[in-house]
Amino acid sequence: MYETDDPSIEQRTRYREWMNRSVGAGTLGFFLAVAVSVLASGPVTDWVLFAGLGAYYLGYIGYLAVWQRTGVRHFDEREAEIERRAASLTAVFVVSVTIFGLPGLVVVQGTDVATVPAFVEGVVWGYMGLVLVFLGLYGYVERRYS
C-alpha cells in the first residue's frame, strides 16, 4: 500500500488486507461453487455447494479471527465517521421507504386499484421488520448506556 514510519499504520494496513482477502476468497469460493453447480449435474453438485458454503463461512471466520486476535485498531476516526454517515443515510432511506411505502401498499392492496408485485411487497415488509429490529436494539442500547 504505502510506506510510513508508524508501525501501527503498517500493521493496520496489513491486517485489513488479510481481512479483505479472507472475505474475498470466501465469497469467490462460494460464487465459483454456485457456478459449477449450475453448469454441472448429478450428486456432485450438492457437495460442491456445501464446499462453497464452507469456503464462504471460513472467509468470514478468517475476517473475524484477524479482527479479534490482533492487537491493532483496524479502523481510525475518519473511517468510523464514514461508516457512521453511511449507516445514517441507510437508516434514513429504509425508514423513508417504510413510512411512505407501507401505508401506500396497504391502501393499494385494500382497494384493488393495482396489483403490487410480490417483490415490492416483500421489500416494504422486510424494511418494516428491519425498522422494528432497529427500534428494539436502539431501546436496548439506550437503556444499557443510560
Image (spheres, grey):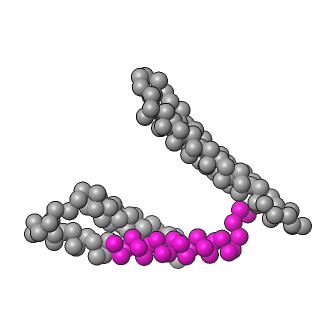
Question: Dominant secondary structure of the magenta stretch?
Answer: helix
In the image, is residue 82 part of the stretch drawn in magenta?
Answer: yes
* Residue at the limit of the structure toward the right, as seen here: 5
Is residue 141 toward the left or the right of residue 63 in the image? Answer: left
Q: Nearer the viewer, residue 90 or 133?
A: 90
Quadrant of the rendered structure where residue 80 is? bottom right
Q: Residue furthest top?
A: 43
Which quadrant, please, contains the N terminus? bottom right
Q: Nearer the viewer, residue 24 or 78?
A: 24
Question: As drawn, is 48 to the left or to the right of 81?
Answer: left
Residue in the picture at 51% in, 42% down: 31
Q: Which residues are magenta?
A: 73-97
The residue that appears at 20% across and 62% down in the rendered structure is 116
Q: Position of residue 110 (x, y in %)?
A: 12, 67
Q: Tell me, yes or no, if residue 110 can be seen here.
A: no
Instruction: Pick whichever, 123 or 141, lies toward us.
Output: 123
Q: Residue at x 55, y 76 (%)?
A: 85
Counting from the top left corner in percent of width and height, residue 127 is at 35, 65
Q: Is residue 18 above or below residue 32?
A: below
Answer whether residue 76 is magenta in the image.
yes
List x then y, in percent, for residue 57. 56, 42
> Which residue appears farthest toward the front when viewing the image?
39
Which corner quadrant of the image does residue 3 belong to? bottom right
How many marks do you count on the picture? Answer: 0
Which quadrant would residue 131 be assigned to in this image?
bottom left
Q: Is residue 77 above or below residue 122?
A: below
Horizontal arrangement in the rendering, residue 50 relative to residue 66 (left or right): left
- In the rendered image, residue 140, in percent from the top left (x then y), is placed at 46, 68
In the picture provided, is 86 more to the left or to the right than 100?
right
- Residue at 66%, 71% (x, y): give it: 79
